[in-house]
Image (cartoon, coloured by chain):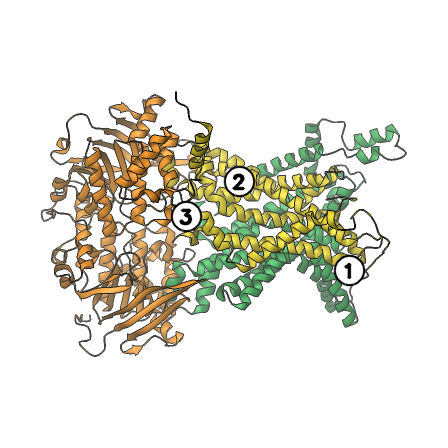
Amino acid sequence: MPSSTPASAMSDRAVEIGQAPAQEQVYRPWRAIARKFFSYKASVVSLVILILIVLFAFAGGPLWKYSYAVSTSDLSAPPSWEHPFGTDHLGYDLMAGVMRGTQRSLSIAGTVAVLATLIGSIWGAVAGYVGGWADSLLMRIVDLIMIFPLLAVAAFLARQSQGGEHGWLLVALVLATLSWTVLARVVRSVVLSLRTREFVIAAKIAGAGPVRIIFRHLLPNTVGPIIVAATVLVASAILSETALSYLGFGVQPPDTSLGLLINQAQGAISTRPWLFYFPGLFIILIALCVAFIGDGLRAALDPKQQRK
Amino acid sequence: MSESVHIAGGTGAPLVSVSGLTVSFDRHREEPIEAVRDVSWSIGSGEVLALVGESGSGKSVSALAVMGLLPRNARVAGSIRWRGEELLGASEKRRRALRGSRIGLVPQDPMTSLNPVYTIGAQIREGIRAHQKLSEREMAERTLELLETMGIPHARERMNSYPHELSGGMRQRVVIAMAMANNPDLIIADEATTALDVTVQAQVLDALKKAQALTGAALLLITHDLGVVAGRADRVAVMQRGEVVEQGTVDEIFYQPASSYTRKLLHSIPRLNHTPDLSAPSDVAPDAEVIHSAFERKVGAEGAPILSMRNVGKHFPVYSRGVIRGRVGVIKAVAGVDLDVEAGTTLGIVGESGSGKTTLIRSLFNLEPITHGTILFDGQDVHRMPPRDRRRMRKCVQMVFQDPYASLDPMMTVRDILMEPAVINRMDRKLAERRVMELLERVHLKPEHAARYPNEFSGGQRQRIAIARALMLYPRLLVLDEPVSSLDVSIQAEVLTLLKELQKDLNLSYLFVSHDLSVVAEIAHSVIVMYRGRIVERGRVDELFRNPKHPYTRALLSAVPIPDPRTERRRERIVFNSDTLASPITPVERTGMWRRLFGGRTQEAS
Amino acid sequence: MLAYLVRRLLVMIPMMLIASFLMFVVISFSGDPLAELKTMQPPPPPEVLHAMAVKLRLDQPLLDRYWMWLSGLFVGDFGPSIHNIDIGAELVKRLGVSLRLLALGIVLAFLMAVAASVIGAVLQFSWADHIISFVAVAMISMPVFWLALQLKRLAISINQELGFRLLYTSGDGAGMTASTPWDRVLLLIGVLALPTIALSMQAFGTWSRYGRVALIDALNSEYVKLARAKGLSETRVVLAHGLRTSLAPMLTVVAAGGAGILGESVVTETVFQWRGMGDLLVTGIQNNDVYVVLGWLLVAGLIIMVFNLIADILYAVLDPRIRYER
């Protein structure tokens, strides 16, 4: 049997997944969406700021002369060139602390968003597509998880195994297991409206199985709502993490996070307000940027506006 | 009763005159888009003017401008005069005083036009209250009177119903009652019957006529359907791409069309070539057995039919509304259907919404398992086939859907869409690639279209892509579910021609489902008429349309608008009283106290 | 309608049973309540540890422990506490304090969200719309505790300006008395104002954004077009047709936010040092007092379910289509 060479098999695969040889002046949904997104000023500015914050948090730590874990001799110094964000009463440099804290908060939010989006999307798509008792069972589980306030359960679970090198990862895992339910509901409702659409029936008539229909037809057409819901998830994960850390159940010293920094600064609101402002500013900035990026994506991905 | 004035401007100023109207819409970060350009028309008191055009012709825009209901991003230039008074630039208060009081609107979709959270009575009263000082009792009486005029049964109880509790035709009559509530001088019907079945459309058009007669109002009829216009309009204005291409009396437009566009439009309309003879009353009882017109089995080639259905039925359960929901009955969506499709021919299935035609054809693909009966494909029982044969059959039977916007996955390129059946059924990739190109050519598209996404194509082009997809696996039978009903008439004609061409070249058999009798008459060889899940009549197309026997078929045929003013004016409608047929809900016998305790009321079938 | 209500109530019972079991299992497996006691220096004598384990029923199998807890609930026994708290009585006391805050916060957030939605939708793309939208996003992005701490700072300077304590920055008002009715009102406002505002802001942000979109959708609908065509006044069109129909979808968002607000109230109460449900939970978790946490979660779950039930009933009242379908 004349078998095809690996190279041609590769190109066949490329054709199958829609990356046909590039042709110019051809409409591509993704390019049109990107163009639309970049026409929203607030979203683009937010994207730039967010990228800068990510760089600041992840590249800033190694470059900055002070470490978040080593105290200096400047005690309770207000912001200056030496310490742009000031220092606390033990002489820790706040900018180093904010860098570290932002890094932790972003890592947690990112992990939560990725995990929860994956679990929630597949869960919701399966429930919506399969329907019947399987749908009821899957969604009752979602209901059950949603009955309990995320913050309270997360606080208890995080408290049980706190501290350590990978403490932040644990916080992320706990938040992810409790917050994917939102995604599941969003995806299910979209899938419910899609599954009776004629292109899905056409695929079924051609003989497509459930796996192909879910991953090839339903999920790609749910990408818009999924991305938008994921941005909401990032913002709410940042806020949940900081709230947990603020209550003392999240990231534990000697590690730090933005919420923990505010917790530690509470007593000094009137004497050393900078300790309180800078971490707060970063939380708000991150959440705000994510929200505006989400708005831009929502508008760019809105199917109502995609039709010509 | 007012006299109708047929010549606009005969006595003083016309009721409404629109001149040089240009409307454009501002868009976010894009050039404004022009909807209508330099449009002029006028309408006299009591006159019926039809604005006719296909989608995108801008036919509704000038009417909305008259009402002052254009969206905020609209820019309007030109002149709109109401009995000589300039309305553009008039105060919002003045415009509001005209709206609902002097001008009534009947919009397209009665489903979305009524507010779902208020009763219909409240919604009618609200319109009266805005313009007249009446006591609550007088208003209730007026509302009742309006609903009764519009032929709403049990009007007194119906006043307290919510819109979702009424059928589509009833809702539209409620909207007409609303439009005539303050005795307007002008009623604007904006595609008022487009979403309705033919028989319901006929009833609603009659209701409009009645409303016009009672109020003496002029009627502005906005439609894409020249058939609707023929028997009803005094004058017609034909619109294309935002401009009026031709205006004249209805006879001028239909018998001496001046513009090439009007001629093309008239030419594209599928017609019933044989005017049915409905003069003699039917001697067939409505619940009689299926009527076989002659020669049914003799069409087409000899040999066994490619598809046969015997006694096919599909039931849906009906649940009670008690604390514990129990099954109290079944709806027989399809109740014992027999049909045969001969190889190389087209069988048309005609029926209105709720007739079970969609359920019937979906049963073919096992999307919803049938309750009883047998389906034979090529003489083999579809449900008892070994899996290998079933896969083979799947390749042989393919489907084309109604809405070309919904039937193509927007996230896939045309190539991927066409390749999908091949990939699933493990067709050789090189052969499949070649087949894609070959089929694109067959349906008159270009090879470079393969790399594009569906939303770059027009409705007609999309439908051709959908047809190409259905042909990928060399099928022998195509199931066409209302394949042209969402297309404009000129596009409709192109797609029908393509389908006929393909059938001849590839020796295909078609199962063609449509609510539109004229389309079926154009393409089918034989036809079955379905009503409430049953076949009421079957026969060869020319035979059945020339000499319909069953009262329902006769009512259906008499309701089809004919694009010929002289014929239309002479026609009489046959009304089919559906109460003579049994309800499709059959109660399930339930014993013991379960039923007595929790049975509850049976849901209405809709 | 009545049948629907009964059915919903009947569904709540198994739901709550399964939820409580799930919670019990998760909490039992997530850690050893005596872990800290065991690592104490010097280590406590084994008899003490054993007595503690017996008290907390750790010597029993899991299912038995669950059964004991569950059957205890029906006679008001919420289980043993490490610190000998009467969990049931404590929950009742704290609930009274917290429900005041929760109810007020939700009502305030909803009213503000409705007002903001109307302004935003009617004046779409105006400067007022842009400002409200920005404030809404800012409120969503702001951690509750940060906002609460800011409010506290602000209140301190307001009090200094006024020369007397109008706004209380800590405490839930327990133990404080006022002589005249006027003083009593003032005290109530002073105690509730800051926490209520802090709690309601995030919900306000979320709901107003959603409400604006829902109202814009409604105002672009065909039935609003027909309402305008009937010659109704713009006020009536917006309120009776637009807002009235968009209330139902808004309600689903409010219902979905219930659990979130409950969580935020924990943070808010902590900032303002209320001795409410929040404090009970936080100290319960700190002390690893599992039955306190279990009791708290049970009550919280019940509150959320009742909240959802009310939302569903209101939905059915607001949208007649639901009334008949179910």
Discs 3 and 1 lie in a common subunit: yes
Q: Nearer the viewer, mark 3 or mark 2?
A: 3
Q: Which chain is displayed in green in the rendered image?
A: C
Residue B158 % position (x, y): 34, 55
| Residue found 29% across the figure and 30% down from its top | B396
Q: Mark 3 or mark 1, which has the lower sequence index?
A: 3
Discs 2 and 1 lie in a common subunit: yes
Residue A81's tag is 1
The amino acid at mark 3 is Glu
**What is the secondary structure assignment of the residue under circle 1?**
loop
**What is the secondary structure assignment of the residue under circle 2?**
helix
Residue A24's tag is 3
Q: Along the horizontal axis of the image, is A162 left or right of B79?
A: right
User: Chain for mark 2?
Assistant: A
Q: CA–CA distance between discs 3 and 2?
A: 33 Å
- Say how many tags the image has: 3
Q: Mark 2 or mark 1, which has the lower sequence index?
A: 1
The amino acid at mark 1 is Trp
Q: Which residue is denoted by mark 2 in the rendering? A: A121
Q: Mark 3 or mark 2, which has the lower sequence index?
A: 3
Q: Which chain is displayed in orange in the rendered image?
A: B
Would you call the spot at circle 1 few (<14 residues within 10 Å), some (14-19), or many (20 or more)?
few
| Residue found 81% across the figure and 40% down from its top | C83
Q: Determine if residue A149 is in view.
A: no
Q: CA–CA distance between discs 2 and 1?
A: 47 Å
Q: Along the horizontal axis of the image, is B309 left or right of A57?
A: left
Q: Which chain is displayed in yellow in the rendered image?
A: A
Q: Nearer the viewer, mark 3 or mark 1?
A: 3
User: Chain for mark 1?
Assistant: A
Q: C238 and A273: which one is in front? A: A273
